[in-house]
Image (cartoon, helix red, strand yellow):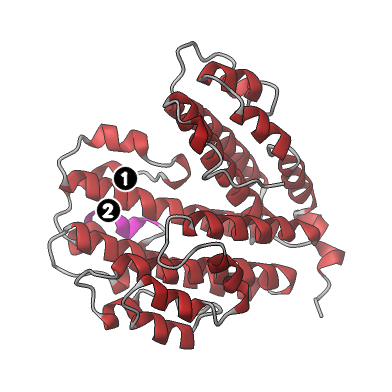
Amino acid sequence: MYGFEALTFNVHSGYLEAIVRGYRSGLLTAADYNNLCQCENLDDIKLHLSATEYGPYLQNEPSPLHTTTIVEKCTLKLVDEYKHMLCQATEPLSTFLEYITYGHMIDNVVLIVTGTLHERDVHELLEKCHPLGMFDSIATLAVAQNMRELYRLVLVDTPLAPYFSECITSEDLDDMNIEIMRNTLYKAYLEDFYRFCQKLGGATAEIMSDLLAFEADRRAINITINSIGTELTRDDRRKLYSNFGLLCPYGHEELAVCEDIDQVRAVVEKYPPYQSIFAKMSYGETQMLDKAFYEEEVKRLCLAFEQQFHYAVFFAYVRLREQEIRNVMWISECVAQNQKSRVHDSVVFIF
């Protein structure tokens, strides 16, 4: 039984919930995707998108267009909408909205550190960072040689600071350490976000628990598959799994000892919600796994809009818009590279 959200929710958050439901009605439909898939070149894609909510963002872009330009402008729309909601939000919704961006902050930190390791230009790397995950001192990440310096010089003043306590070591940064750092940070972030949502209670806690548990389980499965055949030990692998989710704790114990994809499949198929995901793939195959997870995620995110008086709609909307941008990017790349036979391979229909 919920509390009395319906009595007081609209006082502070009713306007924003109406706004986000309005934004959601502007997401591309299956008909839009079918039309985009028929396009012969990027100018055709721009022409079709100009009839959607992306129109004002693309109208002044000259030909010839590039895929990166289309994706950049679509992302700019999401950022503008997010900033508008954040400006209007009061506590605790403003904190909830900030939590949504922490994942992008982690990705940006990893991108800059990895790029610096491979001697890439910092300005070039900054252009590739997601705008929702930017923070003031991000450019100075390039000076860090190890985790301790990364924390002491830069990240101590960012919202990511509390998540670094588990991965501060004096080891030099290399590709393996950076990947472990990414997954350790994500684990701490998801657990923190989960606790925050539980504290909010009501429908927000119920729906967000389900969405975050799915995210935690997906990461656990991906970590297991990606670490097969690497020097990561079973204990190290187990430490990267989040302490909640459907697979926690017994599924984690079994995943930690898996040595090939079919063993992972056998473990996950014991859990009915994930059985259908692996049912779409033949044995030993992982290429379609990401798409199957995205489809399941989209289904869950759309269900968040079926209830009212909760904050999960804001999380769901941002995720659905990000999925839409991935779809547009994939279609644009296929059209630009003349690979139209593969255009449906990675498109996840939202409605």
- Location of residue 294 in the rendering, given as x and y in whole percent from the top left corner: 56, 55
First in sequence: mark 2 vs mark 1: 1
Is residue 141 in view from this perspective?
no
- Location of residue 219 in the rendering, given as x and y in whole percent from the top left corner: 44, 66
**Is residue 289 placed above or below 247 in the rendered structure?**
above
Give the camera-side residue of 290 and 174.
290
- Which span of residues is magenta-colored? 152-158
Give the camera-side residue of 136 and 269.
269
Crowd band around label 1 with a 10 angstrom C-alpha radius: few (<14), some (14–19), many (20+): some
Q: Secondary structure at mark 1?
A: helix
Name the amino acid type tagged 1: Ile
Q: Which residue appears at 76% of the width and 46% of the height?
A: 21
Going by the image, does 11 lie left or right of 346? Answer: right
Give the camera-side residue of 350 and 140.
350
**Residue 138: which numbered mark, if any?**
1
| Residue occupied by mark 2 | 154
Q: Which residue appears at 23% of the width and 49% of the height?
A: 114
Q: Are marks 2 and 1 in contact (CB under 8 Å)?
A: yes
Q: Main secondary structure of the magenta part?
A: helix
- Location of residue 125 in the rendering, given as x and y in whole percent from the top left corner: 29, 37
Is residue 191 in view from this perspective?
yes
* Residue 157 belongs to magenta span: yes
**Is residue 136 placed above or below 1 in the rendered structure?**
above
- Location of residue 63 in the rendering, given as x and y in whole percent from the top left corner: 48, 11
Crowd band around label 2 with a 10 angstrom C-alpha radius: few (<14), some (14–19), many (20+): some
Going by the image, does 136 lie left or right of 189? Answer: left
**Is residue 296 placed above or below 321 in the rendered structure?**
below
The quadrant the N terminus occupies is bottom right
